Image (cartoon, rainbow, N blue to C red):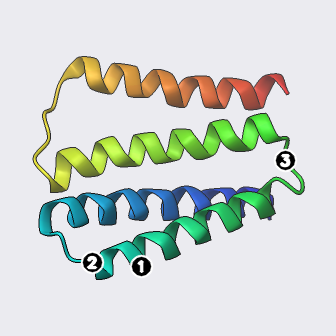
Amino acid sequence: MSWIYLIIAGFMEILGVIVMKKFVLSGKKILILVLMFLFMLSFGFLSLAMRELSMGIAYAVWTGIGAAGGVICGVLFFKESKSILKFILLSLIIICSIGLKFIS
């Protein structure tokens, strides 16, 4: 169950980053409340995941999901730059997170 909590936490992090970008673009104050709620959910599910997973693994996977999701959403929804190097470096983050799981 802890891995499910961790994945949910990662997706809440991605949604939070999307809302943050929308706030920056629109300036709508209500989005700050949505952002706070999403980050509270993200941290809440991360803490549930860390009941069974080590802190290092949980945090690495959580940040990996957030980083990968943030870059992918930025490219898909906000027309941010695409480059092979960006995706290679992003792949390294994901590979390192998986590697940490295998050595623990």
Foreground residue among 74 and 33: 33
Q: Quadrant of residue 48?
A: bottom right
Residue at x 73% of width, y 56% of height? 3
Q: CA distance from mark 3 to mark 1?
A: 30 Å
Mark found first going from the N terminus, 3 or 1: 1
Residue matched to label 3: 53
Residue farthest to the bottom, as pictured: 30
Report the disc number at residue 33.
1
Q: Nearer the viewer, mark 2 or mark 3?
A: 2
Q: Are marks 1 and 2 in contact (CB under 8 Å)?
A: yes
Q: Are marks 3 and 1 in contact (CB under 8 Å)?
A: no
Amino acid type for the residue under numbered disc 3 = Leu
The quadrant in which the C terminus is found is: top right
Residue matched to label 2: 29
Q: Residues within 10 Å of mark 3 (few under 14, many from 20)?
A: some
Amino acid type for the residue under numbered disc 2 = Lys
